[in-house]
Image (spheres, grey):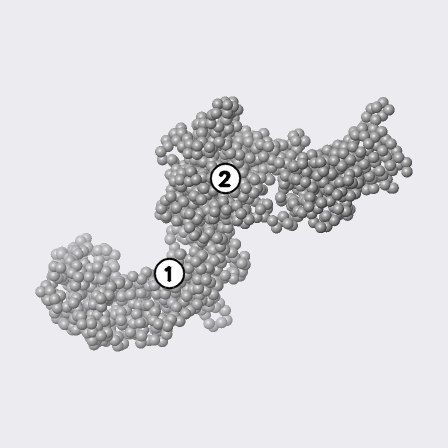
Amino acid sequence: MTTTVIKGLNEQGGRLSSMEFEKLVRQAATTSNNLVLEAYGQHNIGIRLQHPDGLKLTVSGPSGQRLGCMGMPGTTIVCQGSTSDDVGYLNIGAEITVLGDATNGACNAMANGKVFIGGSIGARGLTMTKWNPEYSRPELWVLGSVGDSFAEFNCGGIAVVCGVNPKNPENVLGYRPCVGMVGGTIYFRGKIDHSYPKTNARLNAVGDEQWQWLSDNIGGFLARVGRSDLLPSLTVREEWQVLMPITPQERALMFAGPMPMAEFRNTQWNRSFGGDPLRDIAPGLDRSPIGFIVSGELRRKKPYWANCESAAPCTFYCPVHIPTVDRLRLIREGRIDEAYELLLRYTPLPASVCGAVCPNLCMENCSRQGVDEAIDVQVLGRAVAGSKPPAVAPPLGKKVAIIGGGPAGMNAAWQLALAGIEAHIFEQDDKLGGKLAQVIPWERLSQAIWDEEMKRFLATPGIFVNLGVSMSRDKVTELANNFDFVIVAVGTHTPRRLQFPGSERVIPALDFLKGAKSANPPAVGRRVVVIGAGNVGCDVACEAYRLGADTVTLVDIQKPLAFGKEKAAAERLGATFKWPVVTGEVTDEGLVTKDGEVIPADTVIISIGDVPALSFLPDSVQTVTVGGAAWIATDRAHLTSDKRILAVGDVERPGLATNALGAGKTAAEYIIASCQGREWKPFDKPLIPQKALTITHYVPVAKGTTEGDQASRCLSCASCRDCHLCETICPTGAISRRELTAGSAGDGVYLTIGYEYVSDDDKCIACGFCADTCPCGIWTMNAF
Amino acid sequence: MVSVRSVTLTPSSLTATDLPWIIEHREDRCTLCGNCTAICPKGAIRLSHMRQRLPRLDVFGTQRGSEYRTFTGIRQETDPAKLCIGCGMCAMVCPNEAITPVAGTNENRTLFFENRKGEPMKRGGRRNATGPTLLDRIVFHRISMLTDPALDAGRHEFTATTTLGRVLSPEEFLKRTMNGGWIPPTREIFPFIIGSMSFGALSPNMWLGLLQGVAYCNEVLGLPVVMCTGEGGCPPWVLRSPYLKYIILQIASGYFGWDEIIRAIPEMQCLPAAIEIKYGQGAKPGDGGLLMWHKVSKLIARLRGVPEGVDLPSPPVHQTLYSIEESVMKMVQTMSMAFHHQVPVYPKISASTSAKAVLNNLVRNPYAAGLVIDGIDGGTGAAYNISMDATGHPVASCVRDCYLELAKQGMQNEIPLFAAGGIGKNGNVAQNGMAMVMLGASGVHLGKYMMQAAAGCLGNEKNRCNVCNLGICPKGITSQNPKLYRRLDPDKVAERVAEVYMSINTEVKKIMAPLGRSQSLPIGMSDAIGIADKAAAERLRISYIC
């Protein structure tokens, strides 16, 4: 094979342009495969040059930039001196040997082939080097060192940097090698500054296979650059290290930072503080991470089974606080006798009051109205009419004088007697019952029921009744000396009157009603006018009709206050209401208004209320004047300013019969507690909010007529009905029902239930479903 | 549906469609697991039992009446105290995609009833101004296309730090160097600063997570990130730690925590990065701190040097300062002297038309190390709605005016301006920050962005969540209740801080590289930015592009 020499200078010694030189070289290569190029700084020597039998280029003069660029497989280029920038640029297979140094950009974008450097290279060697897996890997061998920014974006190229006579002995790989490197291997020997990005490359010892490859190939490299003498010194495995790319898969698994945060916390953070940074101001504070759905102490709320801790509206609004809910529960459970007894322990007059005269505040506020209609409490009251009195407790050896035998005094006596305290009633009238007996028309309170309840009352041991007793200061003082307590329950028996001409012709309602209910009722005229159109006025009207009146007109200076059963009864009989009417005088003709109108009347009755008659009160009992009349001032326990004298009923303030019953019971409870040496506690249960109940569990049904109907309709507000819905809805199975062995805390024997529902703190996530589901409003979610 | 007759209506009763957030619950998907009601921070949802009436309407049937079907569903409360805040925690814990809050499309009628008991509504969070901000609309249009050295953000090394502190003029510097005069302290810091959020406004896990992330940025990533304490003191062990150098200590009108800071000075291992004197806050100019008693836990009380469970309002103004001159003299000089004039001390003010007056006073004060201007889009732990919604000044034009004023005086390289308030509020943090830098800021402060990015704060500009003031943060970011803040893993916060800063760092380089800048932040390089809004371009004196 011939050797062709191509000169880079022309005959005149002028430099051939790179274009001219390339033409000559390309032409020569068609006839020769061994070219000696006496170059003179021409660029792109060997570009895209190939010969079917292989081609060898020997570059003897100064080489320009991009020696061997786009070098082809089978082409060998040997540069006998140093070369300029970008040797092996875009090389796809040539083997290029540079015996001296190469400047910047060696192997830039090389995809295949090999570059052997006998000296060192400048900056940005091996950048953008590719490896196409269809071919072998490109290789760069450097005997000395490489400059800065080496192997940037290297994508599969292999570099071997031997570190022999490096330009900078402190750093054979230059500053920040391997930026963006995604493939290939960098073998090196010597010191580096470790400025390679840790997210791109990893420093390793040479692996067995790698060492095998290196030792197999380094001899060839040294031979090419004429330094086979170095073989022994370059085959000491311990002196070699490799930089390997971090794969995207590895990087995805890494925290994006070069050090895992947990490692930073353990090795630096915690050490700098010597422990938790808050330990001095918050010793023992647990800040460790928790989940979002938590149980136990980590919950923000927890459920609480507040059974019977609030009052149902019926109980709350009833002045006697009769636990209707419990009564109905006993009926549901078939414990009828206990249900009746429960009621009788609250009032001696359930049939007369609850079942008849009471406007039933309980029903007015009944939660069942949200479903259909209120529970019918009158059915329940009347059912108890014939029941026996409850058992009386053993005597306590105490006795109480009760002045006045109306509903207030009667319930006080009843409660005291049931508790084993002698109750001595001193009644001015010839019968017990106060206004219930004296003035409420029999139409509204059946005599049969009344008599039966009176019989039961009087038959109760421990109740002593003294009728026709008038009171005086001396008498009261005597009672106070002889009894442990005195209860004043005289009611209001002085009618209020108005002063106008002819007022002496007017009959007070109290006198009229008492008379009407007596054995010898008074006569009434054909035309009756009632001044004062309240409920008592309506009773007056009814009685007037019964006693022969043709027309009854109720007049008032304001809109009549009458309501309910009384008003309906009066209207049914034909009574008319007229207001505003200010009475001017009463004459033979009738009532003359201030405006001069005459309302014809044969009988005029005034019904504007009654006031207490308190002349018998000792000075130790203070009164308060309201509306021109004196009333006894009391506290919540109905104690007066004299700590042994209590006052109950209308004598404190006018009210319903049920208010009187409630007052009597409360006063009695205070006395019972003092006699037993207990602290007295008033009824203080809060009303259960309607929102707490879940009434949609119930569907509308007919009201029904029996106790059983009412019992089954009761919503059991604030009192567990043992329906298991909480247990059923609880998503974590935290709620369970537990049988109680001994009687639990409750209001008394009737309220005792033998179970409770509990929530397991370790299972409960505080979703509140129990509270949102409980029909009775028992479960509450409390923050803690 | 059978009407439940106990429902009571008042003049201010609302239905679900009147509310800002409406709970959509799919009964057919619900497993009744209880997760949603257990997680709801407001108690806004409950299990509801409902009843349906099915009348027997068969013409040929003889029986009349109705049958009833009861069913369950998750329903929301309409009581203003329990309004759904749209945080979406219910949706996050639902195993079955059965529940989610959706924004109400009807008018938000709760606005008419939020002043019960005569107390106007307060909230935490943000201004609730949606849409792109002015900063979002700024583009970097000066791109070197072979005209400047082409830079590669991924390959070239960039120095993207900024100087915090007073820089002397060359003449003055030489004079003082030769005569042994005082050279004001400066810090080279990353231009994205974690802005003042107090230990108190933030939970312990959030605050310490941020600091851990900042420490990681400095010590592992080599990014000189600093954070500001806000007005709530700094834990004593942190004051005595090597991480104090990454902390800007804030002092404000409440002076909370400063007893412990002063106590710790002799034992400090290093100096703090700077001292920030808060005179105003962009979110609520003219109003002070409103840390309410329910966030003043034992820990916070101890940290702030106050009793537990008290309200901790900071007055809107420093009580004994009556003029700019006095403020500068008293506060700046005192703080500077406390640290032997070795720590930069600078004030922070609300963006305002009067900002230039403050700036000119600072220029004349040799101790003033810079000025932070906090704009209307800033966030806060608690503010009256009226302050947050309608009080304040946008940051861009305010900082721009101040920068141009400095440039007029030839002082633009001597006293750095920092911009705060709404940087990154729509997520474009690096873009917003660099736009601010090119308008003239030496750096920006990030608050809400860090909460969202580092801890998953659920708040947004559509009034989602925004209950930082109530201490019920469902992510545990702004709560002092350990049951809530333990939901936040400080390691995860720190990890996210590091990720965020790595990413901002890359994006800053991506913005700087086309400008051909790699070695100094392009502060005031306003020829490189433009906006497709003629009025804004004129006002900011940048180019109008279209």
Residue A604 position, x and y percent, is 16, 62
Secondary structure category for the residue under label 1: helix
Measuring 66% from the left and 33% from the top, which residue is drawn there? B150
Answer above or below: position of B541 versus A605: above
Residue A436 visible: no
Residue at mark 1 = A690
Say which of B387 and B114 sits in front: B387
Residue A551 position, x and y percent, is 21, 65
**Label at residue B246:** 2
Query: Within the image, what quadrant is residue B135 found in?
Result: top right
Answer above or below: position of A234 versus A734: above
Query: Within the image, what quadrant is residue A451 found in?
Result: bottom left
Secondary structure category for the residue under label 2: helix
Circle 1: residue type? Gln
Q: CA distance from mark 1 to mark 2?
A: 57 Å
Answer above or below: position of B483 versus A462: above
* Foreground: disc 1 or disc 2: 2
Quarter holding the N terminus of chain A is: top right
Mark 1 residue crowding within 10 angstroms, few (<14) / some (14–19) / many (20+): some
